[in-house]
Image (cartoon, rainbow, N blue to C red):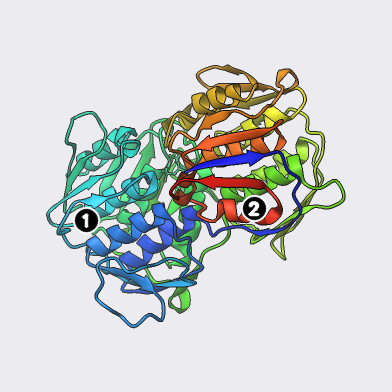
Amino acid sequence: MDVHVTRSTLRGTARAPPSKSYTHRALLAAGYSDGATVESPLVSADTRATARAVTAFGGAVAPAGADGGAEAEPDLADADALAVEGFDGRPAVPDDVIDCANSGTTMRLVTAAAALADGATVLTGDGSLRSRPQGPLLDALGDLGVRAESTRSNGQAPLVVAGPLAGGEVAIPGDVSSQYVTALLMAGAVTDEGVEVELTTELKSAPYVDITLELLADFGVEATPVDDDGDPLDGAAGAAGFSVPGGQTYAPSGGTYAVPGDFSSISYLLGAGAVAADPGGAVRIEGARPSAQGDAAIVGIVEEMGAAVDWDREAGEIAVERADLAGVTVDVGDTPDLLPTIAALGAVADGDTRIENCEHVRYKETDRVSAMAEELGKMGAETTEEPDVLTVHGSESDLRGATVDGRGDHRIVMALSVAALAAEGTTTVRGAEHVDVSFPGFFDAMADLGMDVEREGAE
Ligand SMILES: O=C(O)C1=C[C@@H](OP(=O)(O)O)[C@@H](O)[C@H](O)C1
Ligand SMILES: C=C(OP(=O)(O)O)C(=O)O
């Protein structure tokens, strides 16, 4: 699908979709349990992949309250809650290959789950996912005595994993993906011996491990970040390792778990308001309650760029007014998914926006550092790309409509659409259907706020 976005003025209220990161973890944690209900889940292409994996391991995922038919893949769309039948810590050997589609989180978390099964699991995904790094996790599982291989011996999917995993001590780098740590902690809790993870390089994307720790605690599972001396820390930032005792049982209090709103998705709504809210009004965002999400940093970033932002944390509501934005310097070591949004805002702002510590943002659905530099360039933005830094020269950028490529990447599509709101004329974003990965209702929400958007071709 192509979308044609013409410069527009926005006003009104949008609701943040539920968090993708929490939904993945909640579905898998419910799978590790003997059954639980996941309330207000994100139902999207990526979270469907995790639901498929839970089913492949012998669990089941269906809309809560639906009369339990035996459909292989029940329609989860629009479900307010999902009833998950668990596999109780003992995944069955899947009947078929697990297709993780475009979802890195699914592939990493499910690879470690597969290591618990007494037999082989094969995991694959789309072309993007089959080019992303899985080697460090395969090596770690290999060191723990499990067969864990890339079929092409290049550290990329397709993967073959054959357990069972008993637990133990393992070392892994922290600067490629935090999802490896999340995967080992979630699986480690149901091993016999538990797992101790030592980080050989500094942890990037650390708040995502905090999300994991928060969710594990809500499912009654203990896992602890530790410092160099093995002493416990309050959070994942600065951790030298992690420890999860084995023999634990997943069970959320009252049998249900509620997913909070998604701050990575909120970043587009907030960014759109900051560049295009009606001067006499504001854009309001609901579903923005605080949680462990590092991407809540977008609220402070947009404020620092000069927009008036009011966040009522208790009500979970953010109001943002349009402003003449100014460039900022931001370290995205903890918040890789904000890079496309910040780059788009930087192209609209005056002065330079320097996005530092971004090398790991190159290992996502696409190399997002190059993708944003090149696609914003087509719209007239000047950028400088270094391995670890992207600088957007806002003052030299004269944004105008162009045809840009979403690179098959949901975040590139949404960020370019935000830039398009402020560009002269009309911008065509190719491959816009990929928003289905994390924010299926993105263009409906934007149109409701007043975006002038035409959709062309199949969704
Ligand atoms: O654990 C998670 O839910 C995620 C972790 C991050 O990845 P990395 O840890 O690979 O940086 C993030 O980019 C991704 O969108 C979701
Ligand atoms: C990188 C992302 O997700 P994943 O790693 O799950 O593909 C993302 O949502 O931006």
Name the spot of residue 453 as percent of width and height, x first.
Answer: 62, 46
Q: Is residue 58 left or right of residue 404?
A: left
Q: CA distance from mark 2 to mark 1?
A: 45 Å
Name the spot of residue 407 as percent of width and height, x first.
Answer: 45, 33
Tell me which residue sits at (24%, 75%) in the image. 70
Visible residue check, residue 231: no
Visible residue check, residue 121: yes
Tell me which residue sits at (48%, 60%) in the image. 42
**Mark drawn on residue 140:** none
Q: Is residue 276 left or right of residue 167?
A: right
Based on the displayed image, in which of its 4 quarters is residue 146 positioned?
Answer: top left
- Asked if 119 appears above or below 221 in the picture, the reply is above
Amino acid type indicated by mark 1:
Leu
Q: Secondary structure at mark 2?
A: helix
Tell me which residue sits at (64%, 57%) in the image. 290
Within the displayed image, which quadrant is ligand 2 positioned in?
Answer: top left
* Residue that carries the numbered disc 1 in the rendered image: 116
- Asked if 84 appears above or below 327 in the picture, the reply is below
Name the spot of residue 221 as percent of width and height, x first.
Answer: 41, 63
* Residue that carries the numbered disc 2 in the rendered image: 447
